[in-house]
Image: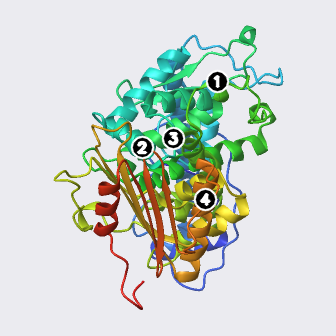
Amino acid sequence: MRGGMPKSSPAILLLVLTLAGAGAGVWLATKPVNQSPLPAGPLPAIAQNSPAEDLPAQIRLLEGQIEYLQGQNAALEEENEQLRRRIAEAGGKGMPKMDAATGGTTPDFEGLTLDLMRHRQLKALPLPTTPATLRDVEDRILAWLRARQPGDEALRFALALTALGWIEQPVDPLPLRAALLARQLGGWFDTRTGLLHLVEADPASGQPAPDHPLAIAFGQVLREYGATLFPPGRPLSTDALLARESLLAGDAGLTRFLLSLQNTAAQAPPSIPGEDPDHPLNQVPMPVFLKELAFFPFHRGFEFAQSLHSADGFPQLDAAYSRPPASSAEIIQPALYLESPPVSADAAPASARPAAPELEGSAPYWDDSLGRFAAFTALRAHNSDDTAGAAAKGLVSDRLLAYAAPEHPRDHAVWHTTLTDPAAADAFFKAMRAALISRYDVKAATDAPEKLILHDRNRRIHLSRAGAQVLLVDAAGENAARALQAAFPAPKEGAP
């Protein structure tokens, strides 16, 4: 039972009298409730069919029942609290006290877990904790990432980005992502062990202390909602994965923030400039484009969670897990998510898309939707943030296809995008054109304002705009470039 029984009042006593069959019109004065503890035992019995002159005795019996239930409720609350603490101690036995970056003393992990659960309003047992090394946490995170992207899926993604020119060399992003997450969180909840593995702080290393409150908050929501967000056997686009990760990370970040408002010992350590080469996150050799995608859930996800929380508190966030955001556009603009019906760049499943065209008799090895934030990240590498943001804002949908080119040093890629209207497509085209010219140091470009054709020894790049669509083809040869252009014909006059 949660909460306490209300004290007796005239309204309560009048209701009791009515239920007891007392006559109407009887005036009663309230009697203060005796605060002394009652002995354990059954509730006092109430005599049936009592005469009116026994009403004061009946009232005393009813007050005794209320007081008895209040005592039982308090005892149950205390028992529940002791049980939670014993479970936490069983999992975190021997864990050291936390040392904040400021040198202050912070709560123990068990108490911190309970505080975070109270702020997040989760009705569940606290997470048991156990000490771990940074490498152990990395390995556990990597196992979780591999389960979501099995086989060579992550490496094929990197190959597709390399073909498109957004990263220099293909590299398996999952070990790098695991290294980033381990350093961002300082811990991980392993669904296989049921334990929250926390990295022990090492002041002698000179590195910032792990952000254990964030790790605990992240572990709590991962335990509660991870299976809902990332169901096994259901492939999701890069854009959809980014959106779901943002809900999870944003929820944890908001919980951690609310705790820090009331607990100075749990304040986050001072942030270090991103350009600092000694920062632990900068020591992970991850391509800039992939690192930006990895940081997005924690940066913009926090703002998304704040928007939902301001609308209806944590119940609104809880409800979001039953209808997760479907695109990074919804994370950037929470109003899109809150609209009814929801607006999403990739609301339709991948299976509802038209079949991918073949190239030289082969199907693509990668078929994906990258979304608004990925487009912004690619454009801002060679444009101002304002220009890139305005250009990416109009993105409605996109499709990236990558094909193997075994006889060439790079594969073929085609990225087909649809914008809200021709004006938005024109802004997107101009920003992409500027990015390509800057990236490849082109001195002169085609005179046609709606096209850009770049040739070098290993690639043929064709960028064009028609209506509200923009097509980028990056192929290893002229024949492949022409075939991919033909696979996405320009829309007819008046079509989007």
Where residue 391 appears, as percent x and y from the top left, is: 61, 68
Three-letter amino acid code at the position of disc 1: Gln
Where residue 295 appears, as percent x and y from the top left, is: 60, 43
Numbered tag placed on residue 304 in the rendering = 4
User: In the image, what residue occupies the spot 33% across and 70% down?
Assistant: 488
Identify residue for label 3.
Answer: 167
Observer-side mark, 1 or 4, equals 1
Q: Earlier in the sequence, mark 4 or mark 3?
A: 3
Q: Are marks 1 and 2 in contact (CB under 8 Å)?
A: no
Q: CA distance from mark 1 to mark 4?
A: 28 Å
Three-letter amino acid code at the position of disc 3: Ile
Identify residue for label 2.
Answer: 458
The answer to whether any part of residue 316 appears in the image is no
Circle 2 Cα neighbour tier, 10 Å, few/some/many (<14 / 14–19 / ≥20) = few
SS for dot 2:
loop
Q: CA distance from mark 1 to mark 2?
A: 32 Å
Observer-side mark, 3 or 2, equals 2
